[in-house]
Image: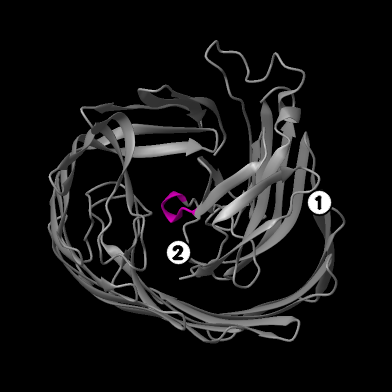
Amino acid sequence: MPSAGASVNFQSPNYTGYLGVGEIDGVFRLGTYVKTVIHSDVVTLGDQAVAFDLPTDIFNTNHFFPTRGIGVNAKEGRASVFLFAGSTALTSGTPFFQAASADMPVGMLFTDVPLSPTLRFSSRNVISRQRTSIQALDWHPGKWLRGGLAMGIGSNQPYLAATTDVESSRLSLKAAYISAGDRFRRITASSIYASEADRENILAAIKPSSNMLLTLGHQNFLQPQSIDPSAAYLHATVNEAQSSFDVRDFRFGAGIFQSTYQNRSNLANNFSASRRITSRLDATVNYFRAFSGAGSHTSNLSGSLRETISQRISLLQVVNYSRGRTNVLYGGSYLSNRFTVSVDYQTLYLPFRANPFSQGISVTLRIRLFGSLQINAQTFRSADGRLRYTASGDTVLTGNFRPAGGDAQNAFKHLRYVVHGRVQDEMGNPVEGAALLVGEELVITNTAGEFLVRRKTAGILSLQVVFAEFLNPASFRVIAAPRTAMLSPDNTASEIRVILARN
């Protein structure tokens, strides 16, 4: 929807806060919070996202619910306690501001207590228009094995979950059986995003050798059909089989996906092959085919060449063949101190559409005007497959409310040391919306999977993948990621690669 607005994040040694205001589709919106520490307890007043995760959430982690009120995180002996009083919230916003409005009154009491070095007890209790009380055990006897058990009620609906998670160098196996009522919700709140796993679920990633990976999965979901918190969930099933393997200098991949939703079903497969021809040139071929219903089907064949001209410039050429038509597409990226632009192309699988494959262009633009003022523009794909656009600007202000570096010759020139890299999945596709903690700075990847951090001086920064902060709704695990990153001059910095696997 059309929107405009602005936001301010502020911090001091004693507190942090946020204020966002704007207009979305002609309606004024406001969001704000203040967080501080009182006698070692962390107190948040205003808008906040409350995490409601259970030890049995091995498939769909990061359940966050927007709220408005007062929350307290405290320590009582060995127990961690979270108290909240206020209301659930209806959120809205854009990349440049976030807002919320109160919805339903709610009170929460969450506790976590370690019973032994390998066993932890969790309790999640919510009082709203309906009641939630779920008790859970998390058993972690070794690095390779983890088990979970949870039972209780959610929004007055019964809930039972038992899970096993096995992780080794050759095998990653996640299995669960979950029984939930069709109106089960962790918190009685208006939301169309809070899907839940249901019934039997299994996902196995098998690595027979260092150059081969096989993924098999069968999962069942309960998906909200409307924002109404009393509406019944709809059931969906997704099956998948994927493989990737290396042969000499080639990397091959193949997958088949089947989804069932009400009386509709989709069957789709894909094949890919890639090879680094030279140190600067990569070639990739992809073939996608989707069946909708019993007879009709669509397919797409594409090939791409990506050439790295220098640390600043890369070029991309894509040839697509679909439905008897051939398209030749061009893109690439350019990175400089003041100007960054990237043009790329994506193919997404949206399983509940009649034609589940959605293709489109992705463009990212960043311009440094002066001081720390930066203007951003980008395109992205919404959940319905449509191409959307957004533009924003941001800057950093010092204590006297002047642009940071505004009184210097050029603040950006002083930040001449960089860490830049790219986050990809195991098939070599960019991962957008991934979160990494580089030093003390949290960065989010763009549509090309790229991230960038600048500093005034050279040095070594720690690097960590932070799944809890991902904007990408998919579930991932780390295959390869360095623990540190070297700050180097802009013209000599090498690109860091982080490889993730989809769960």
Q: Residue at x 22, y 50 (%)?
A: 187
Q: Which residue is mark 2?
A: 475
Q: Between 38 and 475, which is closer to the camera in this rendering?
A: 38
Q: Is residue 360 visible?
A: yes
Tell me where the magenta segment starts and ends, as one range. 465-469
Question: Which quadrant holds residue 174?
Answer: bottom left
Vertical arrangement, residue 269 with respect to residue 499, above or below: below
Color encoding of the figure: one colour
Q: Between 183 and 296, which is closer to the camera in this rendering?
A: 183
Please identify the dominant SS of the magenta region: helix
Question: Which quadrant holds residue 232?
Answer: bottom left
Tell me if mark 2 has few (under 14), some (14-19) or many (20+) residues whose alpha carbon lies within 10 angstroms of its own.
Answer: some
Q: Residue at x 46, y 53 (%)?
A: 466
Q: In the rendered view of the protein, which quadrant contains the C terminus? A: bottom left
Residue 193 on image: x %, y %: 38, 54
Vertical arrangement, residue 124 with respect to residue 426, above or below: above
* SS assignment at label 1: loop
Q: Which residue is mark 1?
A: 311
Give the amino acid type for the residue marked by disc 2 in the picture: Ser
Tell me if mark 1 has few (under 14), some (14-19) or many (20+) residues whose alpha carbon lies within 10 angstroms of its own.
Answer: some
Give the amino acid type for the residue marked by disc 1 in the picture: Gln
Q: Is residue 319 visible?
A: no
Q: Residue at x 20, y 64 (%)?
A: 117
* SS assignment at label 2: loop
Q: In the rendered view of the protein, which quadrant contains the N terminus? A: top right
Q: Earlier in the sequence, mark 1 or mark 2?
A: 1
**Which residue extends farthest right?**
309
Q: Between 74 and 225, which is closer to the camera in this rendering?
A: 74
Residue 15 on image: x %, y %: 36, 24
